[in-house]
Image: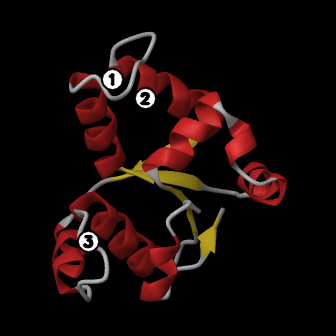
Amino acid sequence: MLLDTCALLWLAHDQTKISRETLRRIEASPAVFISAASGFEIALKHRTGKLHLPIPPQEWIREILRHHQIDVIDLDLEICMKAVDLPPIHKDPCDRFLISTALIRNLPVVTADRRFSDYGVEVLA
């Protein structure tokens, strides 16, 4: 299962924004991932003042990933090329990376963004 950036933040700070069923699925999943693009989004939001973190973003992410046993899927050539080839339903490049990652790895995505399902991705909220 793949967490989008908001889902990672909710898991870390406000789990009430994730349904109980999805939380159970996260806990029971043999593998939970984030995209490396989420690291970019978190660091950017922090730098622009849109996200307050108690420690620097790199330390925060490392701690959250360790605590929740989450692995990172790096952006590779296949993911990046597929993101470009997706239909133009979603314009956000980071979300397009998440969608292409989910499609290539056949992973459901925990997100509040229902447009992911327009690409054939299983969406968990």
Secondary structure of the residue carrying tag 1 is helix
Mark 1: amino acid: Gln
Mark 3 or mark 1: whose residue is earlier in sequence: 1
Crowd tier of the residue under label 2, counting other residues whose Cα lies within 10 Å: few below 14, some 14–19, many 20 or above: many
Measured as percent of width and height from the top left, residue 74 is found at: 30, 54
Q: Which residue is mark 1?
A: 58
- Answer with the quarter of the image where residue 44 lies: top left
Residue drawn at the location 71% of the way across and 53% of the way down: 26
Q: CA distance from mark 3 to mark 1?
A: 23 Å
Count of number-bearing discs? 3
Q: Identify the residue at image location x=51%, y=22%.
A: 63
The residue pinned by badge 3 equals 79
Q: Are marks 3 and 1 in contact (CB under 8 Å)?
A: no
Question: Which residue of the protein is positioned furthest toward the top in this rendering?
Answer: 54
Residue depicted at 32% across the width and 48% down the height: 36
Q: Residues within 10 Å of mark 3 (few under 14, many from 20)?
A: many
Query: Quick one: SS at disc 2?
Result: helix
Q: Earlier in the sequence, mark 3 or mark 2?
A: 2
Foreground residue among 23 and 49: 49
Residue 102 place in picture, x, y as percent: 45, 72
Q: Quadrant of the N terminus?
A: bottom right
Residue wearing tag 2: 61
Q: Name the residue nearer the viewer: 102 or 69.
A: 102
Q: Amino acid at mark 2?
A: Ile
